[in-house]
Image (cartoon, rainbow, N blue to C red):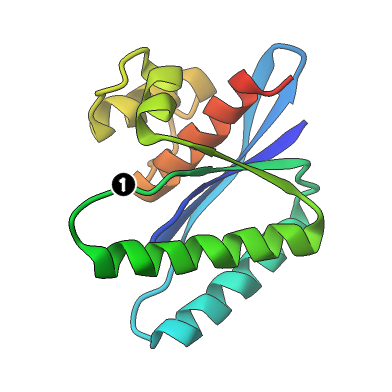
Amino acid sequence: MLVAGFDPGSIRFGVGILKKNGRKISYIHSEEISLKNADFNEKMRVLWESLGSIYSAFPIESAAIEEGFLGKNVKSMNTLAKVRGVVLGSLIHQNIELTSYSPRAVKLAVTGNGNALKSQLNKALTMLLGLKDKKLGNDESDALATAYCHLLHVR
């Protein structure tokens, strides 16, 4: 089973793709899509096209996204909701189901600690996926962690 994990952002958008074969989970691909230096509509066009390219390159069967952090900044929450809408629309277009996980659930699945720091999450993923030679960005790491969490929960 090939699963995509997403870490939504309006400046950097994390994508991680993992494969589960029996009990073994393997790294396939990850990247950070840069969405800076453009107006919002252009950013969303770039995101839509980038996701389309990823779906064309990898036969994804399921997807997971990290739920947004509910802070006090309504404008930021609104922007991230729109980003998540583009992701959902792109997945509906591809007939791929999307599941959401809280940041705490993702951290708990990967590290065993729902309050783990980003550095701890990154280190745990590097070990779990055997990525000694790959430097992961924070958004890339969060996306892979979301995919990993999904693979542990999906039957």
Q: Amino acid at mark 1?
A: Phe
Determine the residue positioned at 74% across, 59% down: 92
Query: Relative to residue 76, is residue 25 drawn left or right?
Result: right
Query: Relative to residue 110, is residue 18 drawn left or right?
Result: right
Residue 10 shows in this picture: no
The x and y percentages for residue 79 are 37, 69
Q: Quadrant of the C terminus?
A: top right
For residue 27, what is the image quadrant?
top right
For residue 1, what is the image quadrant?
top right
For residue 13, what is the image quadrant?
bottom left
Determine the residue positioned at 48% across, 29% down: 131
Asked if 81 appears above or below 19 in the picture, the reply is below
Determine the residue positioned at 50% across, 35% down: 146
Asked if 146 appears above or below 81 in the picture, the reply is above
67 or 1, which is in the foreground?
A: 67
Query: Relative to residue 125, is residue 46 drawn left or right?
Result: right
Residue holding disc 1: 69
The x and y percentages for residue 8 are 44, 56
Query: Relative to residue 32, is residue 17 drawn left or right?
Result: right
Circle 1: element type:
loop
The x and y percentages for residue 116 are 26, 24
The x and y percentages for residue 123 are 33, 25
Residue 50 shows in this picture: yes
Determine the residue positioned at 81% across, 54% down: 95
- Dot 1 alpha-carbon crowd within 10 angstroms: few under 14, some 14 to 19, many 20 or more: few
